[in-house]
Each structure stands twice: as structure tokens, then as C-alpha cells.
Image (cartoon, helix red, strand yellow):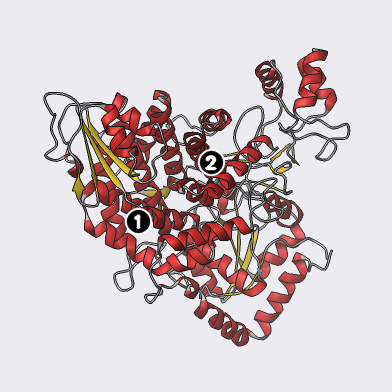
């Protein structure tokens, strides 16, 4: 018999609907029952593409005897971390404080008052490798609660008092200088893997936020770190050499064997990094990977309404990576041509006994590509298509969809790809439908939903010159400040005012693996302030930068997006207004010919300002399309020639 998760919107929760565990979704019903019965809450957190979440579910949650232990002593709650980042963040911080590490699956025990007192990640069904079994944990917690509830509550209260403290604002922090940003780059270089790119040892995650910070810098070593990392990732098995798109991370240090799940956020962020790297270097492979990645998302994660699904699972037919891996015989059969097969085996580095459980994850590191590469890729892609596909998490998250809007709009404008712009506009219209912003379904939006979408709408406005997107960004910025702003200390809370308060109202900061809501909000407000001429937006952004900038400089690997926002604030930002020439005109194309991270762009093809302050009182000069360039509250003389515009942007004094 299905439990209460059968009607959940989240595919992850629905995956557990037939468990013998009496699961509840997070909500008033479960919390009230725990208070009524005086039972602890057992909160189990994961997401649909999480391999070890599936393993623990099969081993323990589908086991009637184990489920009986859970049902007897606890009110059991299943949480999709992507739906409820607030619950996940509190539980994850508790787990990290108690155990020194974290991850998913995340299993946390809370008092009926929602204070955590025991936490861990994966537990096996029997003792092994020094790990307690899940039944042992259940019995020990149940016995402790039955025999010493006051002691457990006291321990929980002490822990809860510390939650959220690590992210409180430090008003005494010194201001960050350009030299501090150079120190951050030097620190990153010290931990850089010069051979394979990335930072640190295995497992390796794509350093999205750090890459964007490095690509803004003019320092040679910064661009080198970004280029090597992007080049090696695109050549490794973490990148789908046939269909495009990146897996979430590599289990090794060479980007060879991925953890095969594909997340929307990875691909949206990396597509922009490859685009920007191409603009910086002219390396053709970078722009190819950008487009292949966006095309993968449109093809495999796009939904009929214009939105984008959250993720593709790592597993198919219960086996991780089965959809993507090949044997040499399978390659021969798929290509049915000895010459093509030999070239494919050479180019993709196919080994006799494979590099992954006897099969091969395809790489592209063996030298020059064969002339027939596109034909080889096409045939293998078509041969792979009938395989049982990984599961799709079709949940639509506003924040991750916003990342995709920004990627599509950015690439569409730079590359002249109208279909990317159209997809971005369609998705933006979908997210903005209705009076209120939601994270997914009926769950109200969190800070990152607002912050990411504000930034995406600014990028979309710059790509289209359509005033609607600017005005929607302003509306959301005002709402974000009102609902999430901390009027006393500055910065932004993760949850809105008036929402049910958990143990603590947090301010998440770390940009790992994706930008925190605080960093994204600061960066979005800084850029919007330049278009809107709004000092208030700048003040709120600076309340984040001044409080946490020094922390970002000391730990650059964890605060790449905040460093990017600091870089923008410290730079000589140029405000460019183009009148009488459209978003695909020669002047806009000239501006986009290079990566210009310290520039905001407004435009009007018909000469009307559309209510955008940067365009106000800007008209045609001698009846010709005209560009205005301003910097540090001073404007240059308007120009009517694209070469003159580029001279203002790239002249010898730059």
C-alpha cells in the first residue's frame, strides 16, 4: 500500500511511495504528530539522482523488518533537498558539526521541537568497514530517547544554539582591495592541478564558481587555470562525448570516471564558462562544448511547457552508468565498419578490459580527431538511443531554470543563435507566470530562486533589449530585499520573512557547488544597480560583500561567486547604452565580440527608453544609431560608429 508520498510532486519522494516505511513529507501533519506522540523525528534527505540514496533505500527502506523499527519509534519524514533547501541546510550543518562531514543520503534525528541531536549519511543494513548498521542506529536512538529524553533534549538544545552562527555577519570586516583578489588567485594557483586541471585530489567536482571568477581576471595564470580545467573536463569521461552534457563529478583526479548523474545546474553554469573561455581564448572546442551542452539540456531536460527538469539519474536498469558505457564489441557492432571502429577505439581510448567495471567510459585524449569523428559520434549516439534510459527528475526548480535562462540568453546573444534566445524567453515567461514566485509547485521561493532569476533577467534584457525583462528584474529585486533582507545586520536570509522558522534562520554563503543565494543576490543587485541607477540595490549588495569578502579571500575555493561579485564592484565598470540599433545589430555584436565581465548593456532599436533609466535622455546623433559609454559617473561623447565604440571600450588606456 502506498504511503503519503504517493501524491508528492517530487519524483524523489514518489520513489519512496511504496516503501513499508510510514513516510510523511515535511509539513505540519508530521510535525504535529511528533509533538502529540512525543516521538523523535527521523528526517531522511536525498534527491532523485543520488546513487547512494537509492542504495540505502533498496537495502533498508524497502526492508519490512527495518521499516518496522523506523515506524515503531519515530515519525519518519522524507525530504527532497532540492525542494526544501532550508530543511536540508539546517540538517546538513548539524551533521557536519556532529561528524565532521556531510553528504547525501542525509539521515538526521530531531526532537519533537525540531532540534537535531544525531546525524549521519549512509548507513549499511549490517555492520561493515567499521560502520554501524542502520538497525543498530535505530535501536540505540530509540533506547536513548525512551530512557534519557531530558539528556537528549539538553544535547539537542546545545547544538541548536550553535546552528547558523558560522554565517553571521561580521560588521568589523576590513574592506577587500584588488590586491586581495590577486592573493585569492595566488592561493587558488597553489592548489591547482597543473596536469589535469581542477583543484585538489579525487573526487573532483567542476569548480563552476571559481572558473567564472578566474575568467574575469587579466592575470595569465588565472586564464591558464580556467582553460586547462575546461579543456581536460571536455576531454574526459565526465563529459558525454556522444550527446554532450556533464556529469556531476568525477570519482578520480583525471575527470575519467564520472558519477553519472547529470544535473541542470552543472550544465547551465558550465555552458557559460565554456562560452566565456571561447571569448577569451578563441579556442574552437570551447564554443563547441558550450553549444553541445546547451543542446543536450534542450533535448533531454526540456519540458513541453518551456521549463527544464532537474536531473538525469546515474542509474539505468539498476546499474550505474550502464546507459553510457561501452565494450569494444559493442563499438564494433554499432559502427559496423572496421575502419571506423578502429578510429573510434583509438580516439576514445577504449581499453581491452575497460576503465569502468569492464566497460569503457569514452574519453577524447588520444591525439588528433579522425576525419570521420562526426559520423562516428552520430552512429554511436543513434546506437545508444534504444538503451534503457536513466530516470528523469522532472521537477522544475525556479533557481536552476534561471541558471539555464542566463546560459541560453548569453550564448544566444554572443553566437547569434535565435533558438537559444527564444528558449530563454519562453522559460522566463513560464517562471514569471502568476502573482508569486515559487520554488517548485506550491513551495514558496527561497533566496536563491529570487537571486538567480534577477541575474538571469538582466542577462536576458541585455540579450534582447526587451524592457519587460528589466522591469521584472526590478520587481523581483524589490521583493527580494523586502522578504529576505536583514535590516539590522545587512545581507540576506535564505528563507523569507514570515515563513515557518526552523531551528535557525540561516544566511548561506558558500558557493559550493553552486552560487549561494547571498553571493548571487549581491552580484545581481550590483549589475541591476548600474542599469537602474539605484543606490539602494548597491547598498544591499555591499552589505554582503563588506561582511564576507575577507572570508572569501581566505578561502577562495569555497567563495568563487562572491569573489566574482567583489571583482565587479572593484572594477571600472562601463555602462553602455545603444540607441537605434537592435540586439543583433553591429554595435551590440561589437560589444559582445569579447568577454566583457565589467560591462552592463542597455539598448533600444526604436529609440524609446522603455522605462530603462540607462536609456533615458539618450537619442540618435544625426539620425544614426548611437552608443553612449559611461564610467565612474562620467560619460564619453556619443559615437555612431562601431569602431569608435570599440575604441572607447578597448583603447590604449584600458
Question: In the picture, residue 64 is in which quadrant?
Answer: bottom right
Q: Provide the residue designation for mark 2.
A: 270
Q: Residue at x 51, y 34 (%)?
A: 278
Disc 2 crowd, CA 10 A, few/some/many (<14, 14-19, 20+): many
Outermost residue on the front side: it is 652
The residue tagged with tag 1: helix, strand or loop? helix
Q: In the shown orientation, is residue 414 left or right of residue 13? A: left
Name the N-terminal-most of marks 2 and 1. 2
Q: Residue at x 68, y 85 (%)?
A: 147
Q: In the shown orientation, is residue 8 left or right of residue 318? A: left
Q: Provide the residue designation for mark 1.
A: 569
Question: In the picture, residue 56 is in which quadrant?
Answer: bottom right
Q: Quadrant of the C terminus?
A: top left
Discs 2, 1 touching: Cβ within 8 Å: no
Residue 245 is situated, as x and y percent measured from the top left of the image, at 59, 35
Q: Residue 368 versus residue 322: which sits nearer the camera?
A: 368
Q: Is residue 627 above or below residue 49?
A: above
Marks 2/1: CA distance?
Answer: 23 Å
Residue 279 is situated, as x and y percent measured from the top left of the image, at 47, 34
Residue 443 is situated, as x and y percent measured from the top left of the image, at 42, 53
Number of numbered discs: 2
Disc 1 crowd, CA 10 A, few/some/many (<14, 14-19, 20+): many
The residue tagged with tag 2: helix, strand or loop? helix
Outermost residue on the right side: it is 352
Question: Would residue 109 be seen by someone viewing this image from the given angle?
Answer: no
Residue 607 is situated, as x and y percent measured from the top left of the image, at 15, 29
Amino acid at each position: 500500500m502506498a504511503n503519503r508520498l504517493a501524491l508528492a510532486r517530487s519524483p524523489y519522494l514518489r520513489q519512496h511511495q511504496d516503501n513499508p516505511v510510514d513516510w510523511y513529507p515535511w509539513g505540519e501533519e508530521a510535525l504535529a504528530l511528533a509533538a502529540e506522540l512525543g516521538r523523535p523525528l527521523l528526517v531522511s534527505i536525498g534527491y532523485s539522482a543520488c546513487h547512494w540514496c537509492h542504495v540505502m533505500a533498496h537495502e533498508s527502506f524497502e526492508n519490512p523488518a527495518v521499516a518496522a523499527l523506523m515506524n515503531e519509534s519515530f515519525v519518519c519524514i522524507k525530504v527532497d533537498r532540492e525542494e526544501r533547501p532550508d530543511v536540508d541546510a539546517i540538517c546538513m550543518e548539524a551533521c557536519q558539526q556532529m561528524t565532521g562531514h556531510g553528504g547525501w543520503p542525509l539521515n538526521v534525528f530531531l526532537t519533537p521541537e525540531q532540534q537535531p541531536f544525531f546525524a549521519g549519511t549512509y548507513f549499511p543494513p549490517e555492520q561493515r568497514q567499521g560502520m554501524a548498521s542502520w538497525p543498530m542506529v535505530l535501536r540505540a536512538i530509540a533506547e536513548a530517547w525512551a530512557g534519557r529524553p531530558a539528556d537528549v533534549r539538553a544535547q539537542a538544545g546545545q547544538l541548536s544554539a550553535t546552528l547558523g552562527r558560522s554565517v553571521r555577519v561580521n560588521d568589523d570586516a576590513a574592506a577587500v582591495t584588488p590586491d586581495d583578489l590577486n592573493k585569492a588567485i595566488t592561493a587558488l594557483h597553489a592548489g591547482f592541478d597543473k596536469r589535469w586541471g581542477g583543484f585538489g585530489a579525487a573526487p573532483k567536482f567542476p569548480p563552476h564558481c571559481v572558473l567564472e571568477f578566474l575568467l574575469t581576471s587579466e592575470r595569465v595564470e588565472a586564464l591558464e587555470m580556467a582553460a586547462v580545467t575546461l579543456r581536460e573536463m571536455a576531454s574526459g569521461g565526465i563529459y558525454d562525448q556522444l550527446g554532450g552534457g556533464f556529469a556531476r563529478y568525477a570519482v578520480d583526479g583525471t575527470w575519467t570516471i564520472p558519477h553519472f548523474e547529470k544535473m541542470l545546474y552543472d550544465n547551465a553554469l558550465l555552458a557559460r564558462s565554456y562560452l566565456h573561455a571561447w571569448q577569451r581564448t578563441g579556442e574552437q572546442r570551447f564554443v563547441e562544448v558550450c553549444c553541445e551542452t546547451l543542446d543536450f539540456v534542450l533535448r533531454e531536460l526540456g519540458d513541453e511547457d518551456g521549463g527544464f527538469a532537474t536531473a538525469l539519474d546515474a542509474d539505468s536498469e539498476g546499474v550505474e552508468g550502464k546507459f553510457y558505457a561501452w565494450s569494444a564489441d559493442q563499438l564494433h557492432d554499432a559502427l559496423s565498419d572496421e575502419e571506423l571502429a578502429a578510429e573510434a577505439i583509438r580516439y576514445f581510448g577504449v581499453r581491452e578490459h575497460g576503465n569502468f567495471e569492464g566497460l569503457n567510459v569514452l574519453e577524447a585524449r588520444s591525439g588528433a580527431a579522425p576525419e570521420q569523428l562526426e559520423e562516428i559520434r552520430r552512429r554511436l549516439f543513434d546506437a545508444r538511443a534504444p538503451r534503457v534510459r536513466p530516470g528523469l527528475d522532472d521537477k522544475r526548480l525556479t533557481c536552476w531554470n534561471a541558471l539555464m535562462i542566463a546560459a541560453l540568453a548569453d550564448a544566444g546573444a554572443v553566437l547569434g543563435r535565435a533558438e537559444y534566445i527564444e528558449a530563454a524567453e519562453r522559460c522566463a515567461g513560464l517562471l514569471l507566470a502568476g502573482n508569486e514566485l515559487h520554488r517548485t509547485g506550491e513551495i514558496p521561493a527561497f533566496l536563491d530562486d529570487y537571486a538567480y532569476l534577477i541575474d538571469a533577467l538582466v542577462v536576458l534584457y541585455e540579450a534582447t533589449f526587451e524592457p519587460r525583462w528589466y522591469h521584472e528584474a526590478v520587481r523581483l529585486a524589490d521583493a527580494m530585499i523586502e522578504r529576505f533582507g536583514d535590516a539590522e545586520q545587512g545581507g540576506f536570509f535564505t528563507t523569507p520573512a514570515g515563513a515557518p522558522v526552523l531551528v535557525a534562520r540561516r544566511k548561506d554563503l558558500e558557493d559550493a557547488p553552486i552560487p549561494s543565494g547571498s553571493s548571487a543576490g549581491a552580484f545581481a543587485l550590483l549589475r541591476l544597480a548600474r542599469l537602474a541607477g539605484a543606490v539602494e540595490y548597491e547598498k544591499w549588495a555591499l552589505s554582503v560583500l563588506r561582511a564576507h569578502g575577507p572570508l572569501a579571500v581566505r578561502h577562495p575555493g569555497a567563495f568563487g561567486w562572491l569573489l566574482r561579485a567583489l571583482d565587479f564592484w572593484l572594477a571600472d565598470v562601463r555602462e553602455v547604452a545603444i540607441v537605434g540599433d537592435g540586439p543583433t545589430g553591429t554595435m551590440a555584436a561589437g560589444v559582445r565580440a569579447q568577454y566583457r565581465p565589467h560591462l552592463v548593456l542597455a539598448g533600444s532599436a526604436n529609440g524609446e527608453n522603455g522605462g530603462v533609466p540607462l536609456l533615458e535622455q539618450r537619442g540618435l546623433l544625426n539620425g544614426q544609431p548611437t552608443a553612449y559609454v559611461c564610467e565612474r559617473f562620467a560619460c564619453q561623447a556619443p559615437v555612431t560608429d562601431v569602431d569608435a565604440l570599440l575604441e572607447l571600450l578597448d583603447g590604449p588606456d584600458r
